[in-house]
Image: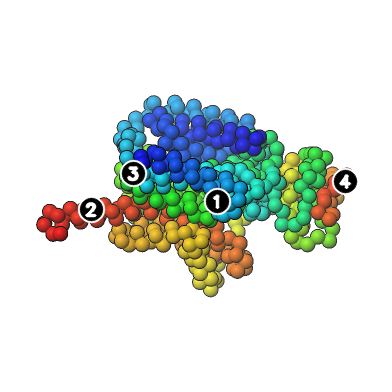
Amino acid sequence: MSSSRALAAATLAVLAAAALPWSDGPLRRLAGGEGEGPDPTFDVELDARSLRAAALRVGDSTYFAEWPGGSPLEQGNLKAAGQLYLARGLPVLEPERAEWIVVARDGRVEVRRR
Amino acid sequence: MRLVAGVLAVNAAFLVVGYALLGPSRWRPSWVGVALLVGAGSVGTLVFFATMVGLHASLAVAAVIAAAVAVGGLVLWPRARWPEASNRLLLAHRPFRAPTGAAFGVVIAVCTIGVVGAFRSSPWLDDVWGIWLPKGLALWHHGLDERLFAPNGEYVTFGVPDYPLWWSVITSLDVQAVGGLDVRVVCAQLALLTVAFVGAVARLLWDCVRPPVLAGSLLLLVLSPELWRHVQGGLADLPLAIYLALAVVAGARWLQTREPFLLALSGFSLAVALQIKTEALVEVAALVAVGALFARRLLWTALALLAALPWLAWRFAHDVPGRAELDLTRVERVPDAARAVSEHLFDPTEWLVIVPLAIVLALVARKPRVLLAPGALLAVVLTAYWIDRDEINFVLATSSYRVIDPVVLSAAVLIPLLAESFLQQRETLREDRALVGEP
């Protein structure tokens, strides 16, 4: 067998092995497994759709994000998610300075004008 | 489809810029990996610098910069009389046998699957979607606005404000090209850079390492589970490692050929590395110092350190503090750090046998000095843990598996060079024995 044929055969063989639907090995993981969506895998329950909706309302305004009674992990995820989804806006430390209040409850984000 | 089309469009632009900078003599498909890394490195760096003078990291700014760099490269090259010796890297034809062809085939297939998998993966590291990408989006919408990038009492600022922003800029451009927020761009971009790195190593070593050795070395790298886990994590440590290792391999090739292009490529790669993570400043300085031990002219790569000045100046002007403290009294942290880092370096389920093999080859090839390159990077990592202010067990658990990437990749690019050196020594020995009539 020539070197170029061996190259092509090996390439195709590995690609085929990864494409087999019943193979649940490293190749399947390498290929991304079941596949994931466009949103992050949060460490806590946080609804990405409500974040995208909030982004449309907040726009480029100032906002204050809070998770009443949330754990440090929940607060941290909300802060990061805000900086990701509401990137056009400006997050402030004090609610008095915000035009919008972004509140997370039961993993869903709601927005209201201050 | 918008995800794939957007990311590929950005990378096509990087490729054009990269090829323009590489010059007409390298306008060949085999240089695609080097071209992508050079294009992404130059455009990302210049867009990052542009944000420091008030511009936004938008596609429009990137397009203007990319066009200017590409035109500059095209104008510069015909005038510059670079030695035609560069063509030695282009012309070498290396026939190889079927098993070697099969090994290259597996490398290509694994890289292909890795890219597909990355396009289907959301980064698992929360810092990526929580810090790196949001910074890039802020650079797009607000520019390098001190209200978001410098700690203050009014606005919520980003974590690790001392980190440079090349990776944020690159991934932000991808999001803009895709047309909407999709965090999978980070993994996709990282996969393309990783595959480009594999191609770049193959290209740069093609004429000096026999194909079976090169194929085996690349196979060892791409079969490492941790490589693709880091790709699917979107870690900034991996592009940092890619550019540092590219500098190492280009520097090593320059030692063999003395071609100015390779010295320039090495210095350029170090300059890009400086725009990725803070620790790169010390890592680049360490690599330059190691290089100077091999050839004084490698000190020219120290010019790359100048590329760190814009970001350092911006940080100084805006009171952005560094995180490391020069407290050398906490020496008790070093053994714990050394143990954790060693476990990751030598665990065959993570990076297979890349690091131990590089060590063994350096010893049997009687070139132990070569290990100074990954060794210096390792020393930087351990020193960082020594002077870091965070609780040692926490910081080791959350970072020791990834900050070793530069050590591993620099060892990986040395493996084919060391193996080739060892085989050549054995052949010479055999010929000498034959000459004196020994069996």
Side of A77 where B308 appears, left or right: left
Which residue, given by chain and number where applicable, does mark 1 sit on? A27
> Of callouts 4 and 1, which one flags the residue occurring earlier in the amino acid sequence?
1
- Image quadrant occupied by the N terminus of chain B: top right
Side of B153 where B395 appears, left or right: left
Q: Are marks 2 and 3 on the same chain?
A: yes
Amino acid bearing label 2: Glu
**How is this picture coloured?**
rainbow
Q: Is residue B375 above or below residue B276?
A: below
Amino acid bearing label 1: Leu
- Image quadrant occupied by the C terminus of chain B: bottom left
Q: What is the distance, in whole Å, between disc 4 and disc 1 at their CAs?
A: 47 Å
| Identity of the residue drawn at 53% across and 67% down | B340
Task: Tell us which disc is closer to us: 4 or 2.
Answer: 2
Q: Secondary structure at mark 2?
A: helix
Which residue, given by chain and number where applicable, does mark 2 sit on? B427
| Identity of the residue drawn at 38% across and 54% down | B415
Q: Are marks 4 and 2 on the same chain?
A: no
**Chain bearing mark 3:** B
**Chain bearing mark 4:** A
Q: Secondary structure at mark 4?
A: strand
Which residue, given by chain and number where applicable, does mark 4 sit on? A112
- Residue B97's disc is 3
Residue nearest the observer in this picture, B289 or B258: B258
Q: What is the distance, in whole Å, between disc 1 and disc 2 at their CAs?
A: 38 Å
Residue nearest the observer in this picture, A4 or B353: A4
Q: Quadrant of residue B21?
A: top left
